[in-house]
């Protein structure tokens, strides 16, 4: 497991977030071929909700927990939508010859006030022992305090990276990495490296979603970095960058340092 890589595929990479239930089959096929070329590197893949999970979760305020009866409809619809997307991602990988098994997070994790408290990792361990890639996702999950909530794919990726003692954690996003914006001119500059002190001073321009946007992504990613795991953020919409990042090669993007 010392060579294990955790790959988080952003929902904005594998779906068109402005159109509900729009799976980017061409993008996922290309990423799957890149993943296939990374063999025999052991991999765990997590994907975001994109236009499948986020709109429903937002409409019903699932992340806040159980407040009113109508939210139960949103809870089960979010789970159903994420299972559909998880199936599409896994099916695409299988179609290019990758042994992959879909494992929705709602069946693996239970949270307490939004933080993972229980994780049934036997399925993930068994998959890795067989050389099969487990594929899980951000999801609506049961919560011991809130009754239910949203567990982001980013949180799952960091949790698994630490629990499985991964060597590397790669975030595939829909931009080249983390940008620094000039507060006067608005001009932006890609940061090849980023330490936590610099991160805390940055002006993040993304609007965000039910899981917090780029600021929360980077904030969460630093948990893995502090545990001694290599963390990189690359553009999953650009050919070859996911493959290079998984292999640990030099690639355009942002690496966490410090």
Image: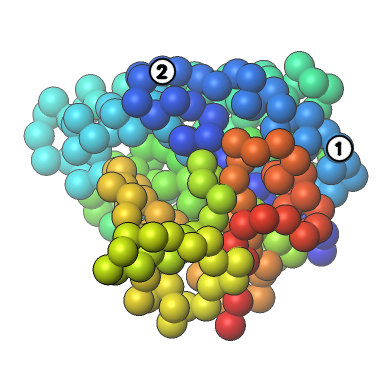
Q: Where is residue 33 shown, x and y percent of the image?
A: 78, 29
Residue at image position (81%, 53%) is 247
As helix, strand or loop, the secondary structure at mark 1 comes to loop
Taking 168 as reference, is 72 above or below it? Answer: above
Which residue is disc 2 drawn over? 21
As helix, strand or loop, the secondary structure at mark 2 comes to loop
Colour convention: rainbow
Residue at image position (64%, 26%) is 28
Residue toward you, 180 or 215: 180
Residue at image position (24%, 35%) is 58
Taking 112 as reference, is 133 above or below it? Answer: above
Q: Where is residue 40 shown, x and y percent of the image?
A: 89, 44
Q: Where is residue 76 shown, x and y percent of the image?
A: 32, 25
Residue 105 visible (yes or no): no
Q: Earlier in the sequence, mark 2 or mark 1?
A: 2
Report which quarter residue 92 is drawn in: top right
Residue 55 visible (yes or no): yes
Q: Are there few (<14), some (14-19), or many (20+) residues within 10 Å of tag 1?
A: some
Q: Report the residue that reaches farthest toward the left.
A: 68
Disc on res. 47? none
Residue toward you, 50 or 77: 50
Between the residue at mark 2 and the residue at mark 1, the CA separation in whole angstroms equals 29 Å
Residue toward you, 253 or 209: 253
Q: Are there few (<14), some (14-19), or many (20+) residues within 10 Å of tag 2?
A: some
Disc on res. 37? 1
């Amino acid at each position: 497991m010392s060579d294990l890589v955790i790959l988080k595929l952003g929902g904005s990479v594998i779906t068109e977030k402005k159109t509900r239930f729009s799976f980017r089959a061409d993008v996922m096929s290309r990423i799957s071929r890149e993943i296939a070329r990374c063999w025999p590197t052991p991999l765990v893949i997590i994907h975001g909700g994109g236009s499948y999970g986020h709109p429903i979760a937002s409409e019903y305020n699932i992340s806040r927990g159980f407040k009113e009866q109508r939210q139960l409809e949103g809870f089960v619809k979010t789970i159903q939508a994420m299972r559909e997307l998880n199936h599409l991602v896994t099916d695409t990988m299988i179609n290019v010859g990758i042994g992959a098994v879909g494992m929705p997070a709602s069946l693996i994790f239970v949270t307490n006030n939004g933080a993972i408290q229980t994780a049934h990792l036997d399925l993930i361990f068994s998959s890795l022992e067989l050389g099969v890639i487990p594929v899980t996702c951000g999801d609506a999950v049961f919560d011991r305090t809130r009754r239910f909530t949203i567990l982001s794919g980013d949180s799952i990726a960091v949790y698994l990276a630490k629990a499985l003692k991964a060597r590397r954690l790669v975030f595939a996003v829909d931009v080249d990495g983390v940008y620094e914006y000039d507060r006067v001119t608005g001009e932006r500059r890609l940061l090849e490296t980023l330490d936590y002190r610099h991160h805390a001073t940055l002006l993040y321009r993304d609007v965000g979603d039910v899981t917090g946007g780029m600021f929360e992504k980077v904030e969460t990613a630093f948990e893995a970095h502090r545990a001694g795991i290599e963390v990189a953020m690359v553009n999953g919409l650009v050919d070859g960058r996911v493959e290079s990042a998984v292999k640990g090669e030099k690639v355009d993007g942002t690496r966490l340092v410090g």
